[in-house]
Image (tube, rainbow, N blue to C red):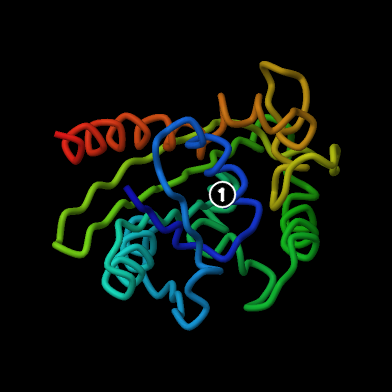
Amino acid sequence: MKIVLATENKHKIEEMKTYLNNLPLEILSKEHFPKITLEETGETLRENALQKARTVAKTTGFWAMADDTGLFVEALDGRPGVFSSRYAGEKATYKENVEKLLKEMRDVPEKDRGAFFSCVLALVHPDGREVVVEGRLEGVIAKEQSGAKGFGYDPVFWLPDRDCTLAEISLEEKNKISHRGRALFKMKGILEGLIKMEQQ
C-alpha cells in the first residue's frame, strides 16, 4: 500500500516515518511530486489538513496523509492557532515565530500561560474516502527557550509533569506523548485496518 505524506516540512516527515515505519507501507513524500502545490486557505486545522490531503490524493492517485498543527495560547485568545507556522509573517522562520510569541507573553503571569498543541491528521483516498483524527498536548508557555531537539514552538512549550520543554526530550519519547504522536497513534490503527482489507 502506497501513501503520500502531503507536507513539505522535513521535521514532520521524519516524525511520521518514524511512527509508521513498522507498517507494510511504501511511504512517499511531497519530494516525489515536486509539481504539486500545497495550499492552506482554511479557517481551521481540519480544513487545511483535508485541503492538502485531497489535493495530493487527487493528483497522485494514492492515499494521501496531511497534517495541520497549531499552538493555542489561552492568554492570546487562542492565537497563534491556525496561523502558527506563519505567525510572524508569511515566510517567517521558527525563530521569528517563537520570538514574537515570547514578546507577546512577556508580561503574562505564570498562572495564565496555559496552552495546548493540536494536530489534525487527514487521510484521503482518490475515491473520496476520508478519515480525520486529532491529537492534543497540554502545556505551558515558558518564559525563555530551552532545548534543541525539537522544532517550531517546542523550545518554549513547557511540560509541567516532566519539568522540561518539548525540545528537551528525544524524538522517540516525543512521538509517545506529543499531539502529533497521539494523532498518529489513532491513524496507525486506521491504517492497519486498511492494510488488512487490501490484503484480503
Depth check: 180 or 60 in front? 60
Residue identifier under label 1: 71
Residue type for callout 1: Leu
Q: Say if 160 sits above or below 33 in the image.
A: above
Depth check: 122 or 95 in front? 122
Residue sitting at x 65%, y 52%: 11
Depth check: 74 or 85 in front? 85
In percent of width and height, residue 55 lies at: 33, 72
Name, please, the residue furthest toward the bottom.
Answer: 35
Q: Say if 57 sits above or below 102 in the image.
A: below
Residue sitting at x 38%, y 59%: 49
User: Is 2 placed left or right of 38 in the picture?
Assistant: left
User: Is 171 placed left or right of 43 in the picture?
Assistant: right
User: Is 60 placed left or right of 40 in the picture?
Assistant: left
In percent of width and height, residue 13 lies at: 57, 52
Residue sitting at x 67%, y 16%: 161
Name which quarter of the figure residue 117 lies in: top right
Residue sitting at x 26%, y 72%: 58
Name which quarter of the figure residue 56 lies in: bottom left
Q: How crowded is mark 1: few (under 14 residues within 10 Å), some or many (20 or more)?
A: many
Q: Quadrant of the C terminus?
A: top left
Name which quarter of the figure residue 61 lies in: bottom left
In percent of width and height, residue 39 lies at: 44, 76
- Secondary structure beneath dot 1 equals strand
Name, please, the residue furthest toward the front.
Answer: 200
Q: Say if 45 sits above or below 25 in the image.
A: below
In percent of width and height, residue 68 lies at: 46, 56
